[in-house]
Image (cartoon, helix red, strand yellow):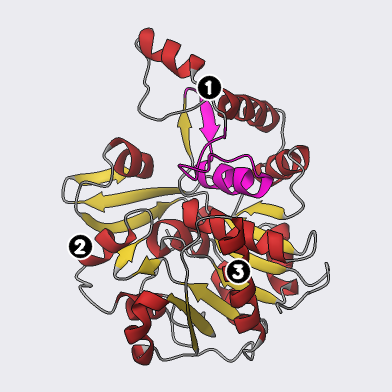
Amino acid sequence: MAPKPDNHSPVVALAGGVGGAKFAAGLQATLPPAALTVIVNTGDDFEHWGLTICPDVDTVLYGLAGVNNPHTGWGRAGETWNVLTETERLGGEDWFRLGDKDLALHLLRNQWLKAGLNLTEGTDRLRRKLDVPSRILPMCNQPVRTLVHTDEGDLPFQDYFVRRRCEPTFRGLTFVGAAKATLTPEVAASLQAASQIIICPSNPYLSVDPILSVPGLRQLIQESDAPVVAVSPIVGGRAVKGPVAKMMREMGHLKHLPLTIVEHYAGLLDGFVLDQQDRAEQSQLPLPALTTDTIMTDLPSKRRLAAEVLQFGHSLPGGNRTANRPRHQNDE
């Protein structure tokens, strides 16, 4: 059985995207109430229709509240599209799909931010209103924006990911504003108190690296005595969802993708979880590994994977990771 930490020794997950939200939902369903804290990527955030849009924060929020669209993994279940349809009819931009329920949340958050709440406070208010027992923490309160370098030039993240559907060839990333970001007291305290730290099966480059770019956050993970485990977003050499495998190949990583991810997180990990379809890759890994079924199709499969990862992390000695620096640093 999975360990049951008390509420003062939370499990901390780093998450972004649909894969991260699915795994976070499994953790929440497995752990005692309030034992989970999720630190979420905000590098995807942008301004649209005059509103601050926080795609990853909202995907995690909706997933943990059980109100997400089960078919897409993002957005709201039972959504309607009256505002978007009318906006399109009037000649407005409709490439980024905001449903009516989603828009209501954005309007309220924008009101709170203008009234003086920071993003952490606004997110906590939203998760309480949606009865989410887990803490959801934006990686920082200052704007950090992911800029994607491609063969067609530099593209803001949402232009690359949504408008262009990741079609341009990936060359690299810059996290604009990261050097000026400040580690929040809430994020720092959660990492310092963590009984386990888990990097969800999120895109290492687009979802996790922005979190690690916040000054001081990577160091807190490196110095933690808690075991740190990452779950691979790769299954059988492919990404379950999103462009991570495409990006890795465009960077020249044509094989041994699990090993590439482990090397990318060098200096942070005590253990790694890979899918059973990649079992042959386990012998290449320089650290303890768990091979299991990482596909999450429903809540039982999310809970099963979460329980296995928690048990695996519980078996590892924390603070025993190497001091090697990661191969990729993005601190701007």
* Residue 75, horizontal then vertical, whole percent: 52, 37
* Residue 231, horizontal then vertical, whole percent: 49, 72
* Disc 3: which residue: 304
Label 1: few (<14), some (14–19) or many (≥20) C-alpha neighbours in 10 Å: some
Q: Quick one: 306 or 330, which is closer to the camera?
A: 306
Could you tell me which residue is drawn at 20 percent across and 47 percent down?
Answer: 168
Picture quarter with the N terminus: bottom right
Mark 1 element type? loop
Quarter of the image where one finds residue 3? bottom right
* Disc 2: which residue: 250
Do we see residue 216 in this rendering?
Answer: no
Which residue is at the far left? 151
Q: Which residues are magenta?
A: 49-77
Picture quarter with the C terminus: bottom left
Separation of marks 3 and 2 at Cα, in angstroms:
33 Å
Could you tell me which residue is drawn at 31 percent across and 50 percent down?
Answer: 148
Question: Callout 1, which amino acid?
Answer: Thr
Separation of marks 2 and 1 at Cα, in angstroms:
37 Å
Question: Callout 3, which amino acid?
Answer: Arg
* Disc 1: which residue: 80
Quarter of the image where one finds residue 114? top right
Q: Is 261 placed above or below 185 here?
A: below
Question: Callout 2, which amino acid?
Answer: Glu
Q: Quick one: 209 or 70, which is closer to the camera?
A: 70
Q: Pointers 3 and 1 in contact (CB under 8 A)?
A: no
Judge from the rendering whether residue 99 lies leftward or rightward of residue 151; answer left or right. right
Q: Is 331 placed above or below 104 here?
A: below
